[in-house]
Amino acid sequence: MVTKNIKLDVAVVGATGLVGQEMLSILEERKFPVKNLYPFASEISAGEKVKFNGEEVTILPLNKKNIESTSVDIALWSIGSELSLEYIPVAIKAKWINIDNSAAFRMEKDVPLIVPEVNGDKLNSVKRGMVIANPNCSTIQLVQILKPLHDQYGLKRVVVATYQSVSGAGKLAMKELEEQTVNLLNGRSISKQVFPHQIAFTILPHIDDFLDNLYTKEEMKVINESRKILALPDLKITSTCARVPVFYSHSEAVNIEFRKSCSLKDVRSLLSHTEGVKIADDPKRFVYPLNVEATGKNETYVGRIRLDESVESGINLWIVSDNLRKGAALNAVQIAELICNKL
Ligand SMILES: NC(=O)c1ccc[n+]([C@@H]2O[C@H](COP(=O)([O-])OP(=O)(O)OC[C@H]3O[C@@H](n4cnc5c(N)ncnc54)[C@H](OP(=O)(O)O)[C@@H]3O)[C@@H](O)[C@H]2O)c1
């Protein structure tokens, strides 16, 4: 939350998207000190309205001229890498402070990649015309639990498998899952536009493009971004990312090997005192993190915590977080709050 007495001109770029819509509601919810709101989207949505703080605000088409002529303090971008690469340089020249949700700038040396509870201290100076990157949704929830565990026990190796919801692929992907599910249940044929295979009732072991090393881009984002955020460039970490036919919230099975010995009781206690993390772990009562329960919440839920009996010191756990909130919009708004307190 912002405690300072300040009012800012805020742009939400991609305001009609799944992340953009969530950004608007989180800005409202957390009473972000907005003086003027400028929602941007494509030409298709220009002229339509978004609701913000009880008022209707007209959507502006994103183009060079509109960026140059709009006075903005902080801009929250969620329009994808290609468009971010095209338009953020214009916003930099116009002296906007840019928080970008795409992968376009995340691995650039001079661009801070921030999860406020984990490495908010890396945002030590804020300048007009800068870019701050919001990490990938799967990375955010992972580093939230890796950071305190590393500080306590030293990470030796991390193996993560993700089970990512369809909302992570945007609003057209949501529509595709919905339509395919309804059509299949009614014995009708289906069509595919977003995913290369039927997504309804299917697990796709494939998110984003395949690379020369046979990992996908998404898998390498989890690996490289975790290393950057934790400031552990040599961290041994590997990942497999899968898309599952659920609408909201990403789940991850995480195996972590430590350098120092650990006890289950201490791991539990450590994670239960970690900001932004909630324990849901009572197997006897069937309590563990569920995507349907994490949806709409701000915390990352952790459960199924158990010792990995195949190594000297290690654990397995299951984490779940709302990809549109902590995985995207909430984290971006929290970064904006950090900025406010530094302006
Ligand atoms: N979904 C997630 O969980 C998640 C998590 C982390 C990061 N992200 C990232 O956030 C970005 C958006 O994701 P999303 O899920 O919100 O996608 P989405 O639901 O498909 O929304 C895309 C947004 O981009 C706008 N847009 C498309 N073409 C445009 C153009 N030429 N000029 C201006 N605006 C344009 C759309 O406006 P119109 O409605 O007018 O077309 C819409 O507002 C992506 O970079 C994604 O990787 C997403």
Image (spheres, helix red, strand yellow):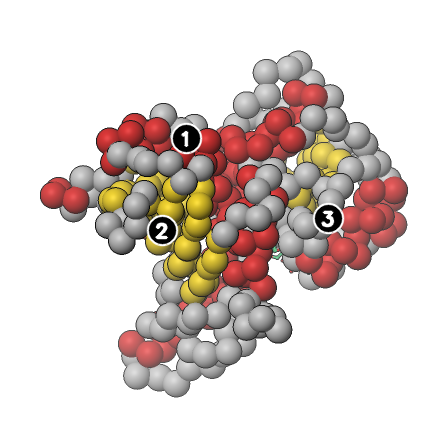
In this picture, residue 202 sits left or right of residue 342: left
Label 2 with label 1: CB-CB less than 8 Å: no
Residue marked by disc 2: 255
Query: Crowding near pointer 1: few (<14 within 10 Å), some, many (20+)?
Result: some
Q: Is residue 120 above or below residue 56?
A: above
Q: Residue at x 62, y 27 (%)?
A: 121
Amino acid type, residue under disc 1 in the picture: Gln
| Residue at image location 50% in from the left, 73% down from the top | 195
- Is 219 displayed left or right of 321 in the figure? right
Of badges 1 and 3, the one in the foreground is 1
Q: CA distance from mark 1 to mark 3?
A: 29 Å
Q: For the residue carrying disc 2, how many other residues have a C-alpha within 10 Å: few (<14), some (14-19), or many (20+)? A: many
Q: Amino acid at mark 3?
A: Glu
> Can residue 11 be seen here?
no
Q: Is residue 41 left or right of residue 96?
A: left
Where residue 141 sits, quadrant-wise, is top left
At x 27%, y 49%, the residue is 308
Distance from Cα at disc 2 to Cα at disc 1: 16 Å
Q: Position of residue 228 (x, y in %)?
A: 61, 44
Name the residue beneath numbered marker 3.
108
Relative image position of residue 168 (x, y in whole percent): 50, 57
Q: Which mark's residue is nearer the viewer, 3 or 2? A: 2
Q: Judging from the image, what secondary structure is the residue with disc 2 in?
A: strand
Choose the circle earlier in sequence order: 3 or 2.
3
Q: Is residue 212 left or right of residue 130?
A: left
In percent of width and height, residue 253 lies at 35, 53
Give the residue number, with chain letter if any, for mark 1: 152
Mark 2 is on which residue type? Asn
